[in-house]
Amino acid sequence: METFSSIAELSKLKDQIRVPGKTLGLVSTGGALHAGHRRLIETARTEVDTLVVCIFVNPKEFSLHEKYERYPRHKQADLEICKELGVDWVYCPETEELFPNEYSTFIGEDQVTFDLCGQSRAHYFPGVLTVIAKYLNLFRPDLIFFGQKDAQKVAGIRRMIRDLHFETRIEVYPTVREDSGLAVDARNEWFSPQQAIDAAGIYEALAAGKSMVENGIRNPDRISAEVIHILSRRRRIRIIYVAIVHRDTMAPVREVIPGETLIATAVWVDEVRMIDNVTL
């Protein structure tokens, strides 16, 4: 495994990374690698000849009040995990190079990222799409891998890839969860034991909605009402949204179509913002 941090280094290594006749895969992470990242990297490793992992806490995904400096960073442990899992290349870009002080170009997407998290975190998706576009331009991977927990981000990136004609395919893998059902996330380490118990209520609520569909209920209002009811019983949870949407367009649906519809939520658990979703 080799690690590099500059575009100049990448320029010298491109012929070694992008080899004709070999498939190239890319996993984009914010570091603080957890069980979800491990599963994603392990799966990606089986599907491509060469695997690149990007480790970068993107400042453009954070607003002024979102504690960018506090976000977990465990670079040495991350590199050890990548080496253990057979990653070929790890790119740890410098913020000053990807986003220098005079940087002013961002990618916007006006449909699938407009609502939901696009309303409560208007800055987020331009930051995400821009850094992913940079990776796609720099590496030209055949495949890029994501977890299902980031459903709206994945939908936005898929739309960007289509609209901007990137020759990359997205692979999406199931959300990895703790024993309690809580989706693994780098910020879970911030939770006290009691906060973690309340945070597990997110999946409890989503699972109840999924169970309703499995029992034949197709009315989105009934399902979302039940999810809201269960979330509201947790003292530390404050709901940002609960939505039942099409998995590709993120648009609200009038009737649940099994396999094509998500129930998605964003909540505050005290001061920590969490997202999750399940396919209905």
Image: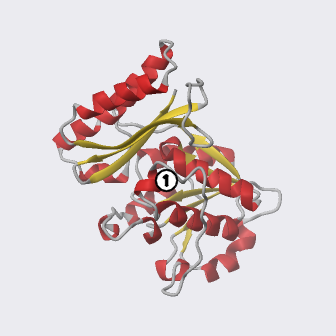
Residue reaching furthest top?
215
Tell me: residue 52, above or below residue 225: below
Q: Is residue 142 visible?
A: no
Return the x and y of residue 41 as percentages of the image width and height: 54, 49
Residue reaching furthest right?
21
Q: Is residue 14 left or right of residue 244?
A: right
Q: What residue type is disc 1 on? A: Glu
Say which of 152 and 39 sits in front. Answer: 152
Q: Is residue 267 left or right of residue 100?
A: left
- Of the 4 image quadrants, the one containing the N terminus is bottom right
Say which of 185 and 131 sits in front. Answer: 131
- Check disc 1 and report its element: helix, strand or loop: helix
Identify the residue position indicated by label 1 in the image.
84
Q: Is residue 156 left or right of residue 140?
A: left
Mark 1 surroundings within 10 Å by alpha-carbon count, few (fewer than 14), some (14 through 19), many (20 or more) = few
Q: Residue at x 62, y 54 (%)?
A: 157
Colour scheme of the rendered structure: secondary structure
Return the x and y of residue 65 as percentages of the image width and height: 30, 67
Return the x and y of residue 169 as percentages of the image width and height: 71, 50
Tell me: residue 28, above or below residue 256: below
